[in-house]
Amino acid sequence: MNGKFPKISPMGERAVLVEFEPEISQEVLEKVLFYKDKISLLYHEVKLEVINTYNSLLIKYISSIEDLYGEILTIKTLFQEDAVSRYSKARLYQLPVCYSKKFGLDLQLISEEKKMETQEIIRLHSNTIFTVYFIGFLPGFLYLGGLPEELYIPRKNEPRLAIEKGAVGIGEKQTGIYPQSSPGGWQIIGNCPVPFFDKNKLPPCEISAGDKVKFYPVSEEEFEQISEDISNGNFKLKSEKYDG
Amino acid sequence: MMGEIEVLQPGLYSSIQDLGRAGFQKYGIPQGGAMDIYAAKTANLVLRNKAKDAVLEITQMGPKLKFTQAAKIAISGADLSPVVGGKTVAQNTVVKINSGETLSFGRRKSGCRAYLAVQGGFKTEKIFESRSWYNGISSFSKLEKGMRLKFEVNDTEKAETFAGVKPFSGYITANHIEVYPGPEYDALTDAQKLLLEKTEYGISKDNNRMAIQLLEPLVNELDAIITGPVLPGTVQLTPSGKMIVLMKDAQTTGGYPRILQLSENGMNTIAQKVMGERFSFKILHYKEDR
């Protein structure tokens, strides 16, 4: 373990922040999730919450930490053990996306900008296995990494005031799906009819950090059919164990 | 038995809040809960409610509420001149309301947010272990005319109350806000750190349950960070120098440098400030025990 990382420091009176190397990579994520599991396991009796982002863990305590430095020492000992891959826990989810003109509001623009056929954009986007790094921003908003470099595109200068629920977008090096209607600055290329955040379910989101996502293109007719199946309760989200 | 409060006029912005949602940030769900936790807990304590019972958070201009059942209430936090049956209601005291009586509010005398607790607690919709209203999670996000809020009616004669609660109120008008250094505090220059301590900051018009923006900028050349965790009370610094104090309904992650982290007391105090009010930061350092 490199001397500078992980960096463990308090964040206010009831949270401890653990930071790993500042990079967006599968390798750092594996480490983050390994220790996240370990901390969650150690503290399962105490009421607290461990959340992760690309390279950080935030340990939130329900009440103030009385012995802050004692707590940080305890956490430090956890990092003596080297992280091992936790691929065995990951699942691969197949999600339908309709990339038609109706939903792919910015496809034409990206096509012109990149001098690339829209079919090629769709092929690249739907042929990639994305990694779920974490859920943030909005309830159920998955941060998906692994976008092919050819599809990197800056956010819009002026964010849209209302992006449709299910909209699939690209922002810089990331892609994601808007789980609810919201303002947003990402470039919109399609729409996914599958709601994967349900406030009436526990957990509300089946997909979690470390899982994989692959999109498959569907026509507008298929999109309508899937939407109907979902409202009738006849749609089953496709997922399988992922072994890398 | 359930009682009901009918909303005759909604006022500026009121919402049902409790201590918030713990354990759901990993799904991108904000923590939520009362902006001034101390005042919310005090109102409940006066009535011998549980600390986690839901209360009505009332911002600046209060609603007009009709009680369909007799109830005992307590109001803490900001003084928004509450009135029942033509009589002014004292803060932090048990007040009996008869069936059919109306509670209304008048001029704002101090603070920004008042908390109305009802004995037995509001029994509105519970979702993810909390009754706190948040757009997209709860069915409602703010009080609207015609709404009916359910509360539990206890045997009010038997239930004892703490008539003698004497809560602190100095924090409401305090002109300093306690903060700890945030994760990117050390990326600031010594001059910038000094400015943070010496500058008097004002509350801008952009202030709500998600965030409070400050008027005075802090010129900086800090790089963006890789999107990382944020908390209520995190102070973000944008490239244009804007300082954003994240509050209870803030998003769960962010990419701006996190220069400060408000203490619990600091959160309660800033929640009681209105647009234009001024304060300075009091930087606390973590107790080093080495």
Image (cartoon, coloured by chain):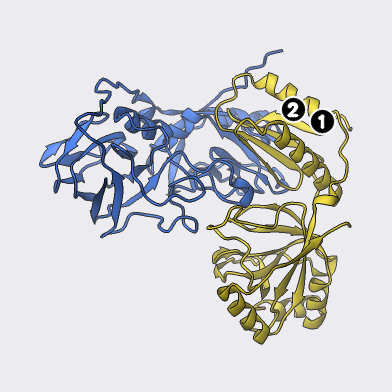
Q: Residue B219, percent across and down?
A: 61, 42
At x 25% / y 25%, what residue is drawn? B160
Question: Which chain is depicted blue?
Answer: B
Element type where label 1 sits in the image:
loop
Which image quadrant for residue A49? top right
The amino acid sitting under disc 2 is Ile
Q: Chain A is drawn in which colour?
A: yellow
Residue type beneath disc 1: Phe
Horizontal relation, residue B35 to residue A149: left or right: left
Q: Which residue is drawn at 15% across and 41% down?
A: B84
* Image x and y of residue A129, in percent: 82, 64
The quadrant holding residue B45 is: top left
Estimate the x, y position of residue A159 in percent, counting from the top left.
59, 65
The answer to whether residue B244 is left or right of residue A221 is: left
Frontmost residue, A61 versus B4: B4
Q: Residues within 10 Å of mark 2 (few under 14, many from 20)?
A: some
Front residue (pair A45, B211): A45
- What residue is at 78 percent from the left and 26 percent from the top? A76
Q: Do labels 2 and 1 share a chain?
A: yes
Residue B258 in sight: yes
Q: What element carries label 2?
A: helix
- Marker disc for residue A75: 2
As displayed, is residue B202 above or below residue A198? above
- Disc 1: which residue: A79
